[in-house]
Image (cartoon, rainbow, N blue to C red):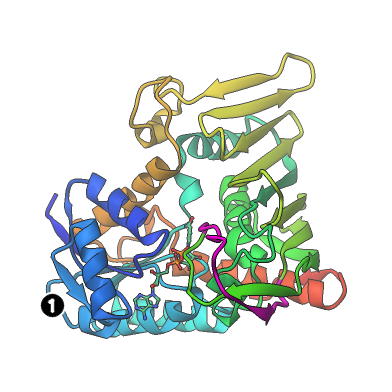
């Protein structure tokens, strides 16, 4: 495999995890990082052992050595950074949500297609070995026709009124909890079952209409130091949400998301109920896939490559009993993207080889979030996902 030269834009919470996952592939060279100032770019370059530091993403994008960029900036920068990268012919690995709204996502998809660059969105939970296994089991009919898809994605890092992050501001977009983490849940539900969401009904709740904004900015998941100065900041996005779902294959569903549920750290859980059996998976216990049955004892499949379907066995890198989790799923996703790039493939000509979420999946996610938000704003009415 030839070496691919990549760069990071936005080295906050998730950016360094992108870089670590890319480096684990062994054929990706991280050559540059950009931040919003030279001093912070240099500090991040030193911390992450990246040779070149740029004071702006535009300067980084002018570097001809850079072939691929990871866009890990706050949501409102996803559009300008990605468009500037596409204009310079760079491949783009964008974090979710792809855009602040579906029209921006459409612009990004159209531009990436026109430029012929590789475009990907990091819906990383798909690439847990047992999510791959669940998808195979559902597709081959092991659980029968799917009729109910349920679950939640709960966190607690915004539980206190002085918890603060750009996601509470306009940079986050019109939806917060649903766009930030509900987007992962909806993507996973669709990926596992092959069903598309057709209609949604939602209620949004803002527990803290006023937050205490610290004078200095804080990265995601960072707690208050206790010694900060605060300003009152009005917030109108949802701290938690409850959503009913109708899928295009007739299945029904329900999920809730929250950033204010004490003790729930990264509590993504998904359950798929079929006519013969059911499956359930918890992100925080990623090496176990629960199998529910009516007339026999329930089961639990432990992650073990020898038990996985041969078609997806390669997603488990370690033998049974050796846990694999979030960072490994991220590595699996990046392996699919970077192999495609290293092999010089085209998104059009090699469409059947695309085994990663694309900007089309990012656009779909933006449309779903928009429909959910519109339903909540209308007071909880069934709302079609418009495409
Ligand atoms: N896939 C996942 O599971 C996952 C997890 C966390 C975050 N995310 C997504 O990743 C993105 C970043 O989230 P985060 O939690 O890492 O946020 P963060 O605030 O921790 O990091 C964002 C970084 O971008 C930098 N930045 C801001 N303006 C910039 C500019 N003009 N040029 C270069 N850098 C700039 C900030 O200094 C900061 O370091 C968001 O879109 C978020 O939704 C995805």
Q: In which quarter of the image is the C terminus?
A: bottom right
Q: How many marks?
A: 1
The foreground one among 148 and 164 is: 164
Residue at 26%, 85% in the rendered image: 58
Image quarter of residue 329? top left
- Confirm whether residue 186 shows in the render: yes
Q: Is mark 1 on a helix, strand or loop?
A: loop
Image x and y of residue 193, in percent: 62, 46
Q: Is residue 215 found inside the magenta-colored segment of the image? A: no
Ligand 1 position by quadrant: bottom left
Image quarter of residue 162? bottom right
Image x and y of residue 332, in percent: 36, 45
The overriding secondary structure of the stretch rendered in magenta is loop
| Residue at the disc numbered 1 | 64
Residue at 34%, 82% in the rendered image: 114
- In the visual, does 364 lie left or right of 174? left
Q: Are there few (<14), some (14-19), or many (20+) residues within 10 Å of tag 1?
A: few
Image x and y of residue 38, in percent: 23, 79
Q: Residue furthest front?
A: 227
Residue at 59%, 82% in the rendered image: 170
Vertical order, 201 against 257 (above or below): below
Q: What stretch is highlighted in magenta?
A: 221-237
């Amino acid at each position: 495999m030839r070496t691919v030269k990549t760069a990071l834009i936005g080295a906050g919470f998730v950016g360094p995890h992108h870089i670590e996952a890319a480096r684990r592939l062994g054929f990706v060279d991280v050559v540059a990082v950009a931040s919003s100032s030279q001093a912070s770019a240099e500090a991040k370059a030193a911390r992450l052992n990246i040779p070149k530091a740029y004071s702006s993403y535009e300067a980084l994008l002018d570097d001809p050595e850079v072939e691929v960029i990871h866009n890990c900036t706050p949501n409102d920068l996803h559009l300008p950074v990605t468009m500037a990268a596409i204009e310079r012919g760079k491949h783009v690995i964008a974090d979710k949500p792809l855009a602040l709204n579906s029209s921006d996502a459409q612009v990004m998809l159209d531009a990436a297609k026109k430029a012929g660059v590789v475009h990907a969105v990091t819906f990383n939970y798909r690439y847990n070995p047992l999510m791959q296994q669940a998808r195979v089991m559902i597709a081959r009919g092991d659980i029968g026709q799917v009729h109910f898809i349920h679950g939640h994605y709960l966190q607690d890092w915004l539980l206190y009124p002085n918890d603060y992050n750009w996601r509470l501001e306009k940079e986050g977009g019109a939806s917060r909890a649903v766009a930030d983490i509900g987007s992962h849940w909806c993507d996973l539900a669709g990926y596992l079952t092959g069903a598309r969401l057709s209609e949604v009904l939602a209620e949004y709740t803002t527990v803290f209409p006023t937050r205490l904004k610290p004078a200095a900015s804080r990265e995601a998941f960072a707690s208050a130091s206790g010694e900060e100065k605060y300003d009152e900041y009005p917030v109108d996005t949802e701290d938690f949400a409850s959503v009913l779902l109708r899928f295009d294959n007739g299945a029904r569903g329900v999920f809730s998301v929250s950033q204010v549920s004490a003790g729930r750290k990264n509590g993504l859980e998904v359950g798929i109920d079929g006519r013969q059996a059911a499956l359930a998976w918890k992100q925080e216990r990623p090496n176990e896939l629960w199998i529910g049955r009516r007339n026999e004892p329930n089961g639990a499949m432990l992650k073990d490559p020898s038990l996985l379907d041969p078609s997806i066995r390669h997603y488990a890198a370690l033998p049974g009993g050796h846990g694999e989790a979030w960072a490994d799923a991220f590595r699996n996703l990046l392996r699919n993207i970077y192999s495609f790039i290293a092999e010089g493939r085209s998104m059009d000509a090699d469409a059947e080889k695309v085994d990663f979420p694309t900007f089309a999946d990012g656009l779909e996610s933006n449309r779903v979030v928009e429909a959910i938000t519109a339903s909540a704003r209308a007071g909880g009415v069934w709302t079609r996902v418009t495409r």
